[in-house]
Amino acid sequence: MLRLVNFAHGAFYAIGAYVGLIVTQQYGLAAGLIAAPIAVALFAVLFDRVLLRLFYDKEPTAQILVTFGVAIVVEESLRFIFGGTTRPFPLPESLSGSFNLGFASYPTYRLLLALGIIVVVFAVWLFIERTDYGLIVRAGVRDRTMVQLLGGNVKLASTVVFALGAALAGLVGAAASPIYSVDPNTGFSFLVPSFVVVVIGGLGSFWGAVLGGLIVGELGSLTTLFFPAASDVVIYVAMALVLLVRPSGLLGESEIIRG
Amino acid sequence: MKDVRFYALTVAGLVLFPFVIHPIGGYAGLATQILIVSIATMGFNLLLGYAGVLSYGQAMFYGLGAYVALLTVSKFFPEHANFWLALLLSIAFVTIVALAIGTLVVRLYGIYFALLTLAFAQMVFFVVFKWTGLTGGDDGIQGVTAPTVPLGFTSIDLTTPFPAVDLGPFGNLSDLHYWYAFVAIVMVLVIAFFRTLTRSQFGEVLSAIRENEERSTFVGFDISRYKLAAFAIAGALTGLSGALRGLYETSTAPDSLTVDTSGNFVIYAVVGGVQTLFGPLLGTGLIMYLQNVVSAKTDAWRLIEGVLFVAVIVFLPGGILGTLKRKPKRTARAIVASALRTSETP
């Protein structure tokens, strides 16, 4: 998780959205939500084994550049295959209604999505913090050589984490599409706000990302309510303020910035 | 003597360039555009090639340069519309913005630096996009009358073509406007500036920081200040490039501020070769030329560009120029030592 924010994440998200769209049209939403993360994870493993592997020992900028290049290729391939137009992602009847919460009614799908996200977030947290495998991953980020000397398979672990991160991006791509609709630029428009979330919350901090997400979401909706013209700008202003006051983010550890 | 030869060759290359591009499917206007955009790519190269940080937000400086230049002549000072004033205000404004944003980002590394500059570029994009009253929003600024260039005793209209002289396969001299000559002169100045800068103590220290940040800190360099200075200089060059582009096209649109524009500078510089003086020029020229030729035939140009970019990173890690003239590799230690030496001799 910790050092794998990269340009390809936008591409993973977009692939997930398209796979989700196509499988859903054939076999229904449940199948789409299962197929998207699997397909994206496979793509990520392939990308890691074929291309990224060549850049493990090079300087970090080379790795960033190659993920950026792959992001362009993926985005443009999607545009070439599916056309550049925005596609709606239809919801099944049963999920498109509203649900009465007693004090307010809320669209059923968004409610389910919110519950689903809580479950996934908790599962990821359990995996990273509470399993032996997660321990190897966390240790590997801090001191790769030492973990290898102690017999931990860091290479395998980092591929697994990479695929897991990609699968999550793919799942979110498929799951969020009924709300945001699908087009080839989806990837980049998802990447930047999600990075802002991470910066505000604190780089490398799990709960920081959750907190940052809540803050960004709330700020966005509040400004849309009171001063719509600024709604797109406000999250960046918040990010600049956080950086100015607390460069490591609200819940971040400063050393991790030296990626 | 070496300097004289260097500048003679540079000037000769710039004089021949628009005629060479003609028989292979380019046109004179493209030569002017390539030179203008190259200035921004050279600025980007100062960051990636010398300071070793990847800025993914150069479009904000480019776009702002264009907007400020055009607004200067159309809205701020329409009665005294002056070419030099437009350039000066653009560069000054962009430099201030670069210093402000640079202060926030120079402490970050790698992907965080890239994504943070990208995020700030998005912020600038949204501000310009939504501030319809000033910037024209989605439509941008159209149909500005670009002022003539005052030279004291006279003033020149840059859209004047050169006199008609038939050059056979190389086109006609009248295809070229004074714009090309003007931009070529600016380019010579930028090259001279860049060459002096990268050979100075400042350039040596930047290289030292790129190679080994810890060692550079320990020998006493304030790395944040050097990076901030590089960020501001790169911003100023990019702003100059944007201002020239805006005045040349007499229009600009929010496109100039998007992620794609930022990404283009990355592609141009990396394909041509970072850490080289002429790599950014070569990369910008090659890609803009290919784009011009290829997109006339197929709409898959961006896909081809992406594949080409990945291929260059994998097979030619130094870019085209960097691979052609591979210097004997200096160790990080030698570079830091050399930076120290240059800073001790006043």
Image (cartoon, coloured by chain):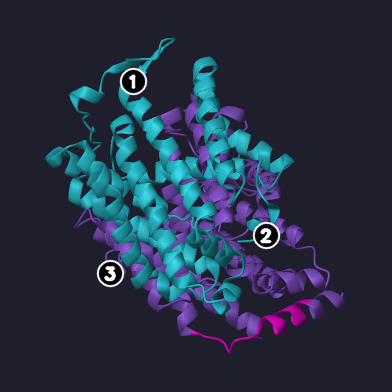
Chain colours: A cyan, B purple
Q: Please, what is the three-letter code of the amino acid marked with disc 2?
A: Ala
Name the residue rendered at 32%, 57% in the picture: A41
Chain identity of mark 3:
B
Marking on residue A107: 1
Chain identity of mark 1:
A
Q: Please, what is the three-letter code of the amino acid marked with disc 1?
A: Pro
Q: Please, what is the three-letter code of the amino acid marked with disc 3?
A: Pro
Q: Secondary structure at mark 1?
A: strand
- Taking B242 as reference, is B173 left or right? left
Note whether B126 is above or below B210 in the view shown. above
Residue under pointer 2: B230
Q: Give the camera-side residue of B41 and B243.
A: B41
Q: Secondary structure at mark 3?
A: loop
The stretch of residues the image draws in magenta is B325-339
Name the residue rendered at 37%, 63% in the picture: B287
Image x and y of residue A113, in percent:
36, 32
- Mark-to-mark CA distance, 2 and 1: 50 Å
Residue under pointer 3: B23
